[in-house]
Image (cartoon, helix red, strand yellow):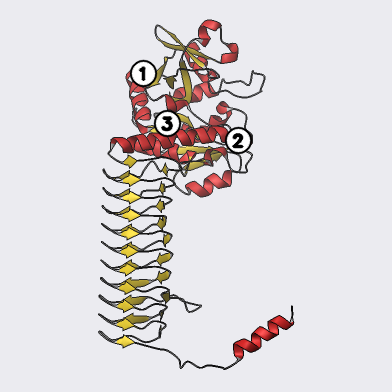
């Protein structure tokens, strides 16, 4: 490898006992994504794609999540950050000529710009170690950075700091760039000479300085880079910080919020100018929403593409496409692999699954459309059901342009309703309906005189 090649070791073995959960701490979510995902994505966006994750508590949860995305090594006992890095020694020995980023898997606000800028300084200054730091208004509880004329001279924990040192506002984020060869040398000398009996990675900084190597710190302009969570209260704080940052970005992009109560928007979501987001709205994944829409109140949109001028009111939509000027809701469920085309109107209590709804089609209310291909200008009456499952297999239904589907129609798949065809209210369609035809299927209505009076007497006699 060249001197500028890079890799990363992500420390993700923590249990997080104060979370009171069986979930590994780095797998707790911020804006719907595990904190570990935030860190891995930051590395990938900084072109640090060669990663090794140190697992520990409930390791299979992390291993199942990342799959073959990167290498994992196991830390059988949690004996400090230095010990965690020691688990990756064999992996690091194969990368002696590289620079390695050491970062905690539960530090979600590390970002690609910070990683890249810190690496640039690390290489330009020919440092053995570059510590990523930040300056904060209230450094209480954090280790302070000690600086001299030629860079960093050490890190002092608050409990060991003098009053003068406590006034220092530059604190460590827990992330470092090392020359890999220098890191391996330092790891050999770290000893558990502390009250916890643990191997501290911070000791490697002193070791390298004492060996005459240069150490310095990159001051990140984003103070949130140091934030983490040790309990549920801290996790809520992280979510609020991330949520407010996304909302601020969208406000700057021209998105309107009349109230942010209950609003949560993922960091990868893109929303066009002029769109209004109302209360209780959750937007997740890689959703893209056009301009001049009204989303909410009380919507959940996950991994969808939404056009411009769309109105969604109390809608849940997943992995689907909604085109321009569609009006949907309230109380509508759009399930995956659906495509709602332009100017479609969908009313209350409608479910659409794995279906295409053509332009200007109207689905008023109380209807289920599943595994169907619906043309344009189709009208659905109340209570229509596409019966797409025969108990073993699912079949598709086709409804052509300008068809009219009467109230309480059952369409038994596989069946086709032709162009401009009608189905009468209450009809069960089991055969293809020709273009322009009316399908009507109703049994003869019979009356049983006195039946109601007889039942009333029976009920009264039991009281």
Asked which secondary structure carries label 3, the reply is loop
One can see residue 183 in this view: yes
Query: Which label belongs to residue 10?
Result: none
Callout 1–callout 2 Cβ contact below 8 Å: no
Residue at left 53%, top 30%? 85
Residue at left 29%, top 46%? 275
Q: Please, is residue 10 above or below residue 145 in the view?
A: below
Q: Please, is residue 313 above or below residue 432 in the view?
A: above
Callout 2–callout 3 Cβ contact below 8 Å: no
Callout 1–callout 3 Cβ contact below 8 Å: no
Q: Which residue is mark 2?
A: 16
Q: Please, is residue 270 above or below residue 218 in the view?
A: below
User: Which mark's residue is nearer the viewer, 1 or 2?
Assistant: 2
Q: From the top left corner, tell me how far across and down residue 412 is, in percent.
A: 42, 81
Q: Which residue is mark 1?
A: 126
Distance from the alpha carbon under mark 1 to that under mark 3: 23 Å
User: Which mark's residue is nearer the viewer, 1 or 3?
Assistant: 3
Asked which secondary structure carries label 2, the reply is loop
Distance from the alpha carbon under mark 2 to that under mark 3: 19 Å
Q: Earlier in the sequence, mark 1 or mark 3?
A: 3
In the foreground, 422 or 162 = 422
Q: From the top left corner, tell me how far across and down residue 14 is, in percent.
A: 58, 35
Q: Which residue is mark 3?
A: 110
If the image is split into quadrants, where does the C terminus sit? bottom right
Q: From the top left corner, tell me how far across and down residue 208 is, in percent.
A: 48, 16
């Amino acid at each position: 490898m060249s001197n500028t090649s890079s890799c990363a070791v992500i420390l993700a073995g923590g249990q997080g006992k104060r979370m009171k959960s069986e979930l590994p701490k780095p797998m707790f979510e911020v804006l719907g994504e595990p904190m570990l995902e935030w860190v891995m994505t930051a590395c990938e966006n900084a072109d640090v794609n060669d990663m090794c994750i140190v697992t520990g508590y409930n390791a299979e949860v992390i291993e199942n999540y990342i799959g073959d995305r990167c290498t994992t090594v196991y830390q059988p006992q949690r004996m400090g950050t230095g010990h965690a890095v020691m688990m990756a020694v064999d992996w690091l020995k194969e990368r002696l000529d590289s620079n390695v980023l050491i970062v905690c898997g539960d530090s979600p606000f590390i970002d690609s710009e910070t990683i890249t800028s810190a690496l640039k300084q690390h290489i330009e200054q020919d440092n053995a170690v570059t510590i990523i730091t930040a300056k904060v208004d209230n450094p209480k509880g954090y280790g302070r950075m000690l600086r001299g004329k030629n860079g960093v001279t050490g890190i002092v924990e608050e409990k060991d700091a003098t009053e003068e040192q406590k006034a220092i506002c530059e604190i460590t984020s827990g992330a470092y760039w090392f020359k890999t060869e220098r890191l391996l040398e330092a790891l050999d000398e770290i000893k558990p000479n502390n009250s916890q009996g643990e191997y501290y990675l911070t000791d490697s900084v002193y070791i390298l300085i004492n060996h005459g190597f240069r150490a310095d710190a990159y001051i990140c302009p984003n103070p949130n880079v140091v934030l983490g969570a040790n309990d549920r209260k801290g996790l809520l704080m992280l979510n609020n910080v991330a949520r407010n940052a996304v909302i601020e970005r969208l406000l700057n992009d021209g998105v309107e919020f009349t109230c942010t109560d209950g609003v949560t928007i993922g960091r990868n979501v893109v929303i066009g100018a002029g769109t209004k987001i109302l209360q209780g709205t959750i937007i997740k994944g890689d959703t893209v929403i056009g301009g001049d829409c009204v989303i909410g109140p009380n919507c959940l949109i996950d991994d969808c593409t939404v056009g411009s001028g769309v109105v969604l009111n109390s809608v849940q939509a997943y992995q689907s496409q909604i085109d321009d000027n569609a009006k949907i809701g309230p109380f509508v469920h759009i399930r995956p692999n659906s495509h709602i085309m332009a100017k479609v109107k969908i009313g209350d209590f409608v479910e659409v699954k794995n279906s295409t709804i053509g332009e200007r089609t109207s689905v008023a209310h109380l209807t289920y459309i599943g595994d169907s291909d619906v043309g344009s200008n189709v009208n659905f009456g109340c209570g229509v059901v596409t019966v797409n499952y025969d108990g073993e297999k699912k079949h598709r239904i086709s409804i052509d342009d300008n068809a009219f589907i009467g109230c309480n129609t059952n369409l038994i798949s596989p069946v086709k309703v032709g162009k401009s065809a009608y189905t009468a209210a209450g009809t069960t369609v089991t055969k293809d309906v020709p273009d322009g035809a009316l399908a009507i299927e109703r049994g003869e209505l019979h009356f049983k005189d006195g039946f109601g009076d007889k039942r009333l007497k029976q009920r009264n006699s039991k009281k």
